[in-house]
Amino acid sequence: MKIVSAIVAGLALAGGVCAQKPPLLAEKEVAAIAGEISGETAKRNLEGIARFHRQRGSNGFHDAAELVAERLRAYGLSDVAILQFPTDGKIFYGTQRSRPAWDAGIGELEEVKDVEEVNEVKERIASYAAEPVALAEDSESADVTAELVDVGEGTKESDYAGKDVKGKIVLVSAQPGAVQDLAVGKFGAAGIVSYAQNQKTAWSGENLDAVRWGHLETFSANKTFGFMVSLRTAHVLRGRLAKGEKIRLHAVVKAGQHEGNYEVVTATVPGADAKLKEEEIAFSCHLDHQRPGANDNASGCATILEVARTLQKLIGEGKLAQPARTMRFIFPPEIEGTLALLNGKPEFAKRIKAVVHMDMVGGGPETKAVFHVTRGPMSLPSFVQDVAWAFAEWVNEESYKFAATGKAEYPMVSAEGGKEPLRAEYSAYTMGSDHDVYQDSSFGIPAIYLNDWPDRFIHTNLDNTANIDATKLKRVGFIGAVSGYFLANLNSTGGVELSLTEIHGRSVRLLSFDARARQIPREEVEALRRNEAEYDGGVSNSVRKFLPPLTGLQVPYDRRLNTSNRPKAVGDGLVTYSRKNVPQGPMAVFGYDYFEAEWAKRGHTTKPRLLEYQGLWGGGEEYAYEVLNFADGKRNAYEIRDAVSAEYGPVPLELVVEYLKALEEIGVVEEMK
C-alpha cells in the first residue's frame, strides 16, 4: 500500500506540473520549438516524397533520397550524405541477406476479347504507369497472353486439384509470393493475379476499389510476374469464371532485379560538449514504399525532416543552445537499410544512445488512425519512452483543451490541418519497423517508436496525401523534436521532474500489468509480477547510461543480486544461453528469414513449435524475438520462459527450450557451461 500511495502521490504532483507548464524542458525552449515547427512545411515535403515509387535500390528511391538530401543541405545540416551499401543477393549485413535492387518500367494487364468487327479488343485491368502498386514487387519481364484460372487461395496443392494451370495465369486470394513456388514452380503457371487483403483491420474489405501492395519472394527460383487488383475487379472475374466463361489476359512486364545499392540518407546537427559530442541521438524513419505511400512512410520521413529544419534553424538563431550530443537524421529502406547501416558502419551503432523512430505519423480522420507512443521490449528497459510519453500526454492535454474550449497556450494547430485533439496512447511494444533492429540485443539501442495504427489505407493506392493531416504532422514533429533535444542534452541527474516522469510511466505500465494479471492462470501471476519489477528496475537503471560514471559505493542495479526471487528450475530449465556476437540482427528481417534459411540448411523440414505459437498478447515472431534478446548469459531457460510469458502470455517451457536449442544448432547462441 505504501508503494501504491507513493505512486499516486507522485502522479498527482506530476499531473499538477504538466497542467501548469510543459514537462522536462524550459518553457522558452518548448515555446520556440512549438512556434517554429510547421505542419505545412512537413506536408509539402511529404507531397514531394510521395511522387516517387520508392522500392529498394530503385531509380524512384534514389530520386526520393536526392530530394531529402537536397532539403537537408538547404536547411543547413552538417555531414549530409547518401551512403551506399552494395546489394547483390549474396552480401549479408548481419542477418539480412542483401536483396538485389528492383526496378520496373512497364506493367500492363489487359483482357483480350474477340469480337466480330475486329480481331480483338483489349480492356485494361491493371497498369503500373497509372498505379505502380498494381505491379507486384520483384516481378520479372514477360509478354504473355493466356487464360485466367481461379485457384482460390492458391497456397495448397488441393487448390489446384482438377485444374490445368500450365502456361496460364492464376487468380489467387493470397500474396503472389505465397503461391509462386506452387503455382509457377510445381504446376507451371505463367503468372499471377492477386487480390490479397493484407494488413487486416476492422475496415478490411469495405473499399472494393482499393488496390493493395503485393510482392513476390525475392529469392525464389521460380521467377514470374504478379499483378494486384481490387476486390471489385476480382469479384467480377471470379463470377465470370464460375459461370464457365473463358477470360484471356495479355500481360506485358518490363521489370527485374539487378545489382545495386541500399541508399541511406544521413545528416547531423553536431554536438557541442567535448565529452558527449561523439554520442548521438538518432531520428529514424524508412524512406522506401510504393507510390504514393503517404502515411507509410512519407509521413515519418517528412516529419523528421521538419524536426531537422526546426532544430537547426532555432540553434542557428540562438533560440536553442547547441545540443551536448550530436543529433543524427537517418532515412533508409525499411529494416534492411538499417541493418546495412549498423552492420556496414558499426561506428554508428556504437555512437547512438537512443532513437526517435517515426513510421506512419500523419494519418487524418479518414484513415481511422490511432497515434501511439510505443514502449520498448521488456528485454531492453529504458526511460526514454517515458520521456516521449510525458511530452505526448502534455500535447494531449493542450490539444484537448483547445478543441473543447477554443483556447490553449499551445494548441499546435496548422492552418491546413484539423483541430481535433491528438489523443495519443502509451502502448506496449509492437513489432514491425526499424525500431525492432535498434532494440535487438545485437545493438541494444532503446527506441521511441511513434506510429499510427490502425490505418485503413495502409499498403494501398489510397494511402495518399489527401488523407494526411498537417496538424498531426506538427504535433508529432514537436513530440519527436523535444524528446530528442532533451535526450541530447541529458548529462546530469535530470532532477525531480525526470524522476516524476519515470514514476508516471511506471504507473501506466502497472495498470497494463494489472490488466494482464487478471487474464492469466493464478500460478503465472508471480512470474509476471517478478518480471514487472525487474523491468521497472531496469528502466530506473537505464538513466545511468546517459550520466557521468557514478562515484562512491553505489552499486548499479543487477537482477542477479536478488537471488531469493529467482524461480526454481530443473533439467533443461537450468541451462543458460548467451547470444554470440555475430550475426547481428533479428532472425526474421525484410524479405529474408535468417533462422528459416539456416534451419533448412541442416535438413530440417519442420519449424520449432514456438514460431507458430499464439499467446494472449503476441504470436510466434514476438516470442522468438524476445527469447533471443533475453539470452543474455544471465537468465536460464526457465527465467527466459517467465520473461516472455509476462510480455506475451504464458508459454510452455519446452517450446522455449526447443527454440533455444535450435538457435544453438544454427550458431546464434551458445550454452554457458
Image (spheres, helix red, strand yellow):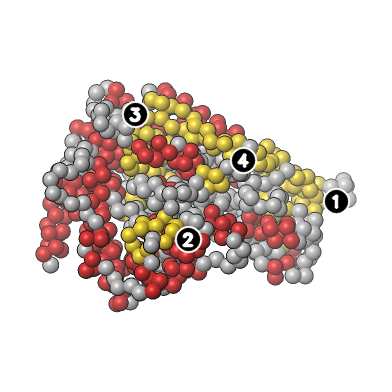
N-terminal label among 1 and 2: 1
Which residue in the structure is indicated by mark 2? Answer: 664
Q: Taking 24 as reference, is 374 left or right? A: right
| Mark 1, secondary structure of its residue | loop
Looking at the image, is 597 positioned above or below residue 465?
Answer: below
Residue 97 appears in view: yes
Q: Which mark is residue 269?
A: 3
For the C terminus, the image quarter is bottom left
N-terminal label among 3 and 1: 1
Looking at the image, is 357 positioned above or below residue 45?
Answer: below
- Is label 1 in contact with label 2 (beta carbons under 8 Å)? no
Residue 89: x, y in percent? 61, 44
The number of numbered badges drawn on the structure is: 4
Rendered residue at 17%/49% (across/down)? 499
| Mark 4, secondary structure of its residue | loop
Q: Taking 76 as reference, is 293 left or right? A: right
Q: What amino acid type is highlighted by mark number 3? A: Val
Viewer-nearest of labels 3 and 1? Answer: 3
Which residue in the structure is indicated by mark 1? Answer: 115
Label 4 and label 1: CA atoms lie apart by: 47 Å
Residue 366 appears in view: no
N-terminal label among 2 and 3: 3
Q: Which mark is residue 88?
A: 4
N-terminal label among 4 and 1: 4
Q: What amino acid type is highlighted by mark number 2? A: Glu
Residue 56: x, y in percent? 56, 40
